[in-house]
Image: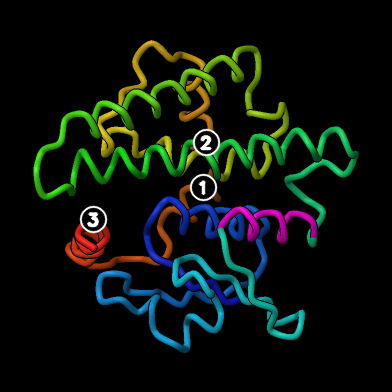
């Protein structure tokens, strides 16, 4: 049994999609990032970075895992699914997981900030991060040519990347001219577990998410 502390963000959805794909029991604990619940001392004891998601494994002495990529790796390795067991296959999946963690997420996140939330329109920032996000999308598109999934078989690399790419328009980044990426997005969109995972943690106040983003760019 697991407890997932989460909010409806791309990083939060990575963890909920993974749990749904595995079909394991878990309890959802919504975290209101708009009111700063993720910074409360009791939460920071679980997640020193004060972010979401956090996963607690009650079957392993209430072991807490923070960082979305680490959560995906932990679950994949514990349950022996969605990551190859051979060294080469595992390394390939981890490489594309790290590509999302170090590239797509941070760059698109900055594009979100400058395009949506920056108090003043700062075009150089918008251009920089939109162009870099598009460049990363083009790498994904080339990788997906002739493949259904990033590492041939469906894996945590796909689970990590899809929640970010699906909201490309929020960052003002288009996917036109990227046919392999678009086909992959449709493939992921049709998976029932992905649909269920994207519905977690349920209905929340969208103003809370906006308020949280605004707080990030002004501090």
Q: Which residues are magenta?
A: 68-77
Q: CA distance from mark 2 to mark 1?
A: 7 Å
Look at discs 1 and 3 and give the one toward the viewer.
3
Mark positioned earlier in the residue sequence (2 or 1): 2
* Viewer can see residue 49: yes
Side of 82 relative to 102 (left or right):
right
Q: Are marks 2 and 1 in contact (CB under 8 Å)?
A: yes
Q: Are marks 1 and 3 in contact (CB under 8 Å)?
A: no
Q: CA distance from mark 3 to mark 2?
A: 31 Å
Q: What quarter of the picture does the C terminus occupy?
A: bottom left
Q: What quarter of the picture does the N terminus occupy?
A: bottom right
- The residue furthest right is 86
Residue 84 pos. (x, y %): 82, 41
Q: CA distance from mark 1 to mark 3?
A: 30 Å
Residue, disc 1: 194
Specify whether residue 181 is painted magenta.
no
Residue, disc 2: 188
Residue, disc 3: 217
Residue drawn 53% across and 20% down? 139
Q: Secondary structure at mark 3?
A: helix
């Amino acid at each position: 049994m697991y407890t997932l502390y989460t909010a409806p963000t791309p990083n939060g959805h990575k963890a909920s999609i993974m749990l749904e794909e595995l079909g394991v029991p878990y309890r959802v604990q919504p975290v209101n990032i708009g009111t700063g619940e993720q910074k409360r001392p009791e939460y920071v004891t679980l997640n020193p970075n004060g972010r979401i998601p956090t996963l607690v494994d009650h079957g392993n002495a209430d072991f807490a895992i923070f960082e979305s990529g680490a959560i995906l790796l932990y679950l994949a390795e514990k349950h022996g699914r969605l990551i190859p067991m051979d060294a080469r296959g595992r390394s390939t999946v981890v490489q594309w997981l790290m590509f999302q963690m170090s590239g797509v997420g941070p760059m698109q996140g900055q594009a979100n900030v400058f395009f949506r939330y920056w108090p003043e329109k700062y075009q150089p920032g918008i251009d920089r991060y939109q162009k870099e996000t598009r460049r990363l999308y083009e790498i994904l598109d080339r990788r997906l040519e002739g493949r259904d999934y990033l590492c041939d078989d469906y894996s945590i690399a796909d689970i990590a990347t899809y929640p970010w790419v699906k909201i490309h328009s929020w960052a003002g980044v288009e996917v036109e001219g990227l046919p392999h990426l678009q086909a992959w997005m449709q493939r992921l969109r049709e998976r029932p577990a992905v649909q269920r995972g994207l519905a977690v943690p349920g209905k929340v106040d969208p103003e809370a998410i906006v308020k949280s983003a605004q707080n990030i760019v002004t501090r």
